[in-house]
Image (tube, rainbow, N blue to C red):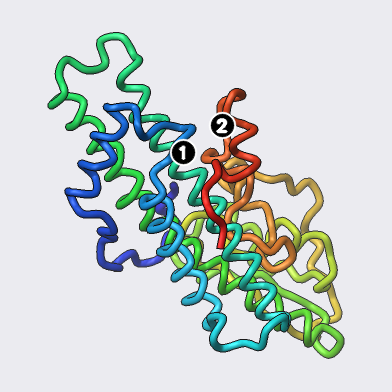
């Protein structure tokens, strides 16, 4: 994650899980009752619920605010499902990493050693990483909501212009995008509709500008625009891309991944 263009991250820490819940997972993995074929449902559900809260916050609507099968309803439905699938992949990865402690030679010397190392892994996933992912769910849902509005008004306002906040923390790549104007239907927005990184503060403004800024000659995806952000949450109806490393699963587990590790979807 790059902090150069990050928002002011003053949000309170996310503490979803009690020590007792962590102990239950750690003991289950040690005993073999929790593994990558049998993930902990409580972990999965609590992560998914938290990220879904971020979706509702960013979209500024929940299911109680919209009509059944309306455009907003179907968008929220698809974003929520994506968040649940992402949460399954996240639960899988942390379970796999903790389980590997038991099979890696000289990785642990005692149960206490295992527990200490497992606890560090679980808190990294479910506190540090989750806080960033929660912020991302808010930002991507905001973008999806904005895209809905853009589509509804594009006949009168056919152009979009990329804007950074123009301060010293803007990433160089995002500064390069600043001011680019393209039509709403230009494929450019399939990749570069903000956010374009963790805690990205960029946005687009819609207008009637009839001259495109076409300084795209030779423009290629730089390394600091991660592939996992090269999508449009409103067009693709997702919060997290399948290019996210959580979806990089072992070959033997791919069948389970296709059915969300047998975890319940909403």
The residue drawn where x is 56% and y is 31% is 249
Q: Quadrant of the C terminus?
A: bottom right
Residue placed most toward the observer, 151 or 256:
256
Q: Secondary structure at mark 2?
A: loop
Estimate the x, y position of residue 258 in percent, counting from the top left: 65, 41
Residue placed most toward the observer, 221 or 136:
136
Q: Secondary structure at mark 1?
A: helix
Estimate the x, y position of residue 163 in percent, counting from the top left: 61, 71
Estimate the x, y position of residue 182 in percent, counting from the top left: 80, 69
Task: Give the residue pinned by disc 2.
Answer: 249
Residue placed most toward the observer, 184 or 141:
141
Left/right placement of residue 62 relative to residue 31 reads right
Give the total of numbered labels: 2
Task: Give the residue pinned by disc 1.
Answer: 92
Q: Quadrant of residue 212?
A: bottom right
Left/right placement of residue 93 relative to residue 218 reads left
The residue drawn where x is 26% and y is 66% is 12
Compared with residue 264, is residue 24 higher up or lower down, i.e. above or below?
Answer: above
Estimate the x, y position of residue 9 in percent, counting from the top left: 33, 64
Residue placed most toward the observer, 229 or 233:
233
Residue, far top: 105
Compared with residue 45, is residue 156 higher up or lower down, i.e. above or below?
Answer: below
Instruction: Measure the C-alpha gap from mark 1 to mark 2.
Output: 8 Å
Judge the density around disc 2: few (<14), some (14-19), many (≥20) Cα neighbours within 10 Å: some
The residue drawn where x is 45% and y is 67% is 167
Note whether residue 128 is visible: yes
Q: Are marks 1 and 2 in contact (CB under 8 Å)?
A: yes
């Amino acid at each position: 994650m790059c902090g150069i263009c990050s928002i002011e991250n003053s949000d309170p820490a996310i503490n979803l899980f009690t020590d007792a819940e962590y102990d239950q997972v750690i003991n289950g993995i040690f005993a073999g009752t929790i593994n990558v074929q049998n993930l902990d449902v409580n972990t999965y559900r609590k992560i998914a619920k938290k990220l879904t809260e971020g979706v509702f916050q960013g979209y500024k609507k929940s299911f109680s605010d919209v009509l059944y099968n309306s455009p907003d309803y179907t968008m929220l439905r698809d974003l929520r499902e994506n968040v649940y699938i992402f949460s399954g992949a996240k639960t899988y990865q942390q379970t796999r990493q903790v389980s590997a402690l038991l099979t890696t030679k000289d990785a642990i010397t005692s149960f206490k050693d295992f527990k200490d190392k497992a606890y560090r892994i679980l808190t990294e996933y479910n506190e540090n990483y989750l806080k960033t992912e929660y912020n991302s769910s808010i930002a991507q849902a905001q973008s999806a909501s904005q895209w809905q509005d853009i589509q509804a008004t594009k006949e009168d306002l056919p152009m979009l212009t990329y804007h950074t906040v123009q301060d010293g923390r803007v990433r160089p790549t995002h500064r390069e995008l600043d001011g680019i104007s393209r039509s709403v239907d230009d494929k450019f927005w399939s990749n570069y509709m903000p956010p374009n990184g963790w805690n990205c503060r960029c946005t687009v403004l819609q207008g009637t500008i009839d001259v495109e800024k076409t300084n795209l000659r030779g423009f290629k995806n730089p390394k600091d625009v991660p592939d996992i952000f090269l999508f449009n949450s409103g067009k693709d109806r997702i919060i997290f891309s399948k290019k996210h490393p959580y979806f990089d699963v072992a070959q033997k587990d791919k069948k389970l991944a296709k059915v969300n590790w047998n975890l319940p979807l909403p």
